[in-house]
Amino acid sequence: MTGGALLSILVAWLLAIASPGPDLVQILRLGALRRNGVACALGIMTGNTLWIVGSMVGLSALIAAVPWVLTVLFLVGGAFLAWMGQGALRGGLAERRAGGTVVPTGATTGTAAAGGVSTLGAWRLGLLTNLANPKALVFFGAVFAGFVPPDTGWGMRLIVLVLLLVTGVAWFVAVAVMVSVPALSRRLQAAGPWIDIVAGVVFLVLGVVLVGEGLLQAG
């Protein structure tokens, strides 16, 4: 692989992780408390690591040979995002009705009470949010199919993996640290119910879209 190919992969990767999506929304929901935001960011990158390694060892080729695997991923991932979305939406609406005084007990609700989620719970939410979106696999399949030739050695694949992991961790952790800055954190806390409501709608819409794509592929 040439330096130009590595740069192309890096640019495509940065554009993908910087674009709005479930990962960034989840960090906004949990990031008012820095340790939870960082844990969520690391969970997201744990999921991305699994997608990257899976693509490298041939998961995309498996899906090309057995299309129903992707169908299952779309259905399961979409159902999980929809479930998480309805939980966030209900929690946000409940907080609004109670004037922002409700302290949710579920791990999927409560931006205004982000401290109620354990650090491990925040990491788990980041991981599950990332894994629930099978479009990550589509992206990685396209990236490696387009920029990493099949005969690329494992040494170069390791370089690509480290490059993506370092930049990914740096980006998501930077976002988590930024939203935990006291001035912004207080605003996130105050706007917690609305963030949960918007996040719930986003997750629900994405979940429905993914389930719809899965059903279309199954048909």
Image: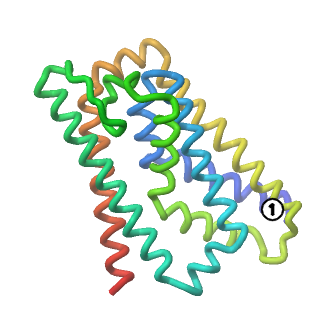
Whether residue 11 sits left or right of residue 162 in the image: it is left
- At x 46%, y 36%, the residue is 121
Percent across and percent down for residue 144 are 69, 68
Colour style of the rendered protein structure? rainbow
Residue in front for this viewpoint, 24 or 16: 24
Determine crowd level at label 1: few under 14, some 14-19, many 20+ residues with C-alpha closer than 10 A: some
Tell me the SS state at disc 1. Answer: helix
- At x 29%, y 48%, the residue is 85
Residue in front for this viewpoint, 130 or 172: 130
Residue beneath disc 1: 157
Q: How many marks?
A: 1
Q: Is residue 214 above or below residue 39?
A: below
In which quadrant is the C terminus drawn?
Answer: bottom left
Whether residue 34 sits left or right of residue 51 in the image: it is left
Whether residue 174 sits left or right of residue 162 in the image: it is left
Q: Is residue 57 above or below residue 171?
A: below
Q: Is residue 15 above or below residue 108?
A: below
Percent across and percent down for residue 187 are 34, 18
Q: Which residue occupies the extreme left position in the image? A: 97
Q: Which residue occupies the extreme top position in the image? A: 182
In which quadrant is the N terminus drawn?
Answer: bottom right
- At x 70%, y 50%, the residue is 164
Q: Based on the displayed image, in which of its 4 quarters is residue 57 positioned? A: bottom right
Percent across and percent down for residue 154 are 85, 65
Mark 1: which amino acid? Arg
Whether residue 41 sits left or right of residue 79 in the image: it is right
- At x 69%, y 61%, the residue is 53
Percent across and percent down for residue 82 are 30, 55
